[in-house]
Image: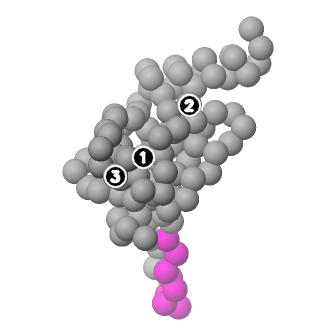
Amino acid sequence: MTIQEQLLNDLDAVFDDGLTLSITHTYNGGASQETLKVFFDRSYEAAFPEGSVESANLSILVKSSNAGNITRDSIFTVSGTTYYPIENQGDEQGVTRIFLSEDQI
């Protein structure tokens, strides 16, 4: 077994058997729907005394092999809240991070 195959097997164990959240992914203009297992990362905001605010976007981590149907027109439902993708960042190790917004851009 190659190192790449071992990494992908490890990803299967983490995503399929790990502490993931099942979310609904709607695509093809609402014609298709699937359930994805993802890690969901909520945003945060930190206010500083000088008045500036730092925040991070919401994002999900999904196995790249399960991200093939995700496009700019995708809609994600996470715990009853609708989110829209604003950026996809794939990596060489088989994981894709998708940054989300509650506002359709």
Q: Position of residue 49 (x, y in %)?
A: 49, 87
Q: Disc 1 residue type?
A: Phe
> Taking 20 as reference, is 87 left or right?
right
Magenta range is: 48-55
Residue at position x 36%, y 69% from top?
103
Q: Secondary structure at mark 3?
A: loop
- Circle 3 sits on which residue? 29
Numbered mark located on residue 80 in the image: none
86 to 10, vertically: above or below: below
Closer to the chain start, of discs 2 and 3, is: 3
For the stretch drawn in magenta, the main secondary structure is: loop
Q: Tell me the distance, in whole angstroms, between the alpha carbons under discs 2 and 1.
A: 17 Å
- Circle 1 sits on which residue? 40
Numbered mark located on residue 65 in the image: 2
Q: Position of residue 3 (x, y in %)?
A: 76, 18
Closer to the chain start, of discs 3 and 1, is: 3
Query: Outermost residue, bottom direction?
Result: 50
Q: Is residue 13 magenta?
A: no
Q: Position of residue 44 (x, y in %)?
A: 44, 65
> Taking 91 as reference, is 21 left or right?
left
Q: Tell me the distance, in whole angstroms, between the alpha carbons under discs 2 and 3.
A: 21 Å
Which residue occupies the foreground of this view, 104 or 50? 104
Quadrant showing the C terminus: bottom left
Q: Is disc 1 surrounded by few (<14), some (14 to 19) or many (20+) residues within 10 Å?
A: some
Residue at position x 67%, y 23% from top?
7
